[in-house]
Image (cartoon, rainbow, N blue to C red):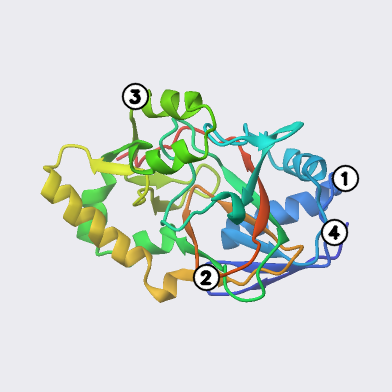
């Protein structure tokens, strides 16, 4: 077993992991420790790693089944599970979101590996959506527990189209039926409740009038981005982030100049479950 050291970055969200070389042949005890660390801290950070697309895919298989790279954006050649995110090619994620919540089974989580980063800027922030839920009043939590929301790719449609050379995949994604997920999601492994809405893909809370939904979603979002519920990571070349998409949002800052190249691998998730009263 590798003697890894997990150091929290905040009281609830984010931890650095040292003493681990991420490879496709990690021993089972180390994988188990990292799984538990992910559940405890929601996003893990590893410095000084070296993973090509094949090695990243092999690593991901230790923690779940990799998804296709993206429903719209092209995969790395020869690696259908790996997404290239190159700022010089227009890749960006400067809107708060959880990955692909317009799908019936959004990803469990993802690995993001920095290949080249700017000397200043280009940080990524994560938000703790379980802590956000707990920060709300018991009365509001009880109201939200019974709600669902509509998720669709509509808000990101222009960006997706710009990343799809043929337009076929973007058109098919945009034409798919919206999905409905519980506003409050129960984590399938920990049982913790977290808010499962985000500004990029959540269109409306079901059963509310549009102005009511807009106000409630804005209230939740304001709570989610309070400083005490965020962790900010300044990337160095070789870094890997591994986050739980079921209970976090993230946002990639665009205030940088120079190259910023990364590869990402997502893991298959399950159908979000709500609160059973």
Structural distance between the alpha carbons of marks 2 and 1: 29 Å
Q: Quadrant of residue 262?
A: bottom right
Q: Secondary structure at mark 4?
A: loop
Residue wearing tag 3: 177
Viewport quadrant of the N terminus: bottom right
Q: Residue under label 2, please give it.
A: 231
Q: Position of residue 44 (x, y in %)?
A: 65, 61
Task: State if disc 3 and disc 2 touch (CB < 8 Å).
Answer: no
Q: Is residue 246 left or right of residue 8?
A: left
* Marks 3 and 4, the one that precedes in the sequence: 4
The residues tagged by marks 2 and 3 sit, at their Cα atoms, a distance apart of: 34 Å
Q: Mark 2 touching mark 1, by CB under 8 A?
A: no
| CA separation in Å, label 3 and label 4 | 42 Å
Label 1 secondary element: loop
Q: Is residue 147 visible?
A: no
Residue where numbered disc 1 is placed = 25
Q: Which residue is mark 4?
A: 21
- Crowding around mark 3 (Cα neighbors within 10 Å: few <14, some 14 to 19, many 20+) is few
**CA separation in Å, label 4 and label 1:** 10 Å
Q: Is residue 34 left or right of residue 233?
A: right
**Earlier residue among tags 2 and 3:** 3
Q: Earlier in the sequence, mark 1 or mark 3?
A: 1
Residue mark closest to the camera, 2 vs 3: 3
- Provide the secondary structure element on which disc 3 rests: loop
Q: Earlier in the sequence, mark 2 or mark 4?
A: 4
Q: Nearer the viewer, mark 1 or mark 3?
A: 3
Who's the residue at 34% across and 52% down the image? 199
């Amino acid at each position: 077993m590798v003697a890894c050291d997990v150091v929290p970055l905040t009281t609830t969200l984010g931890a650095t992991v040292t003493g681990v070389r991420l490879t496709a042949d990690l021993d089972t005890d180390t994988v188990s420790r990292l799984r538990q660390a992910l559940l405890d801290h929601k996003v893990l950070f590893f410095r000084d790693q070296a993973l090509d697309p094949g090695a990243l895919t092999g690593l991901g298989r230790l923690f779940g089944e990799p998804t296709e790279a993206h429903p719209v954006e092209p995969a790395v050649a020869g690696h259908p599970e790996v997404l290239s995110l190159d700022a010089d090619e227009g890749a960006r994620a400067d809107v708060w979101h959880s990955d692909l919540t317009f799908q019936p089974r959004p990803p469990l989580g993802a690995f993001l590996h920095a290949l080249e980063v700017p000397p200043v800027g280009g940080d990524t922030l994560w938000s703790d959506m379980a802590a956000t839920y707990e920060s709300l009043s018991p009365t509001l939590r009880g109201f939200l527990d019974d709600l669902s929301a509509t998720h669709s790719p509509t808000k990101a449609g222009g960006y997706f189209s710009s990343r799809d050379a043929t337009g076929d995949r973007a058109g098919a994604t945009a034409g798919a039926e919206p999905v409905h997920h519980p506003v409050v999601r129960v984590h399938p492994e920990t049982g913790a409740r977290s808010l499962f809405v985000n500004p990029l893909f959540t269109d409306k809370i079901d059963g509310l009038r549009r102005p009511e939904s807009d106000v409630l979603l804005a209230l939740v979002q304001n709570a989610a981005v309070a400083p005490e519920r965020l962790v900010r990571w300044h990337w160095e070349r070789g870094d890997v982030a591994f986050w739980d998409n079921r209970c976090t949002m993230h946002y990639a800052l665009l205030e940088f100049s120079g190259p910023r190249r990364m590869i990402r691998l997502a893991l298959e998730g399950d159908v979000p479950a709500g609160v059973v009263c």
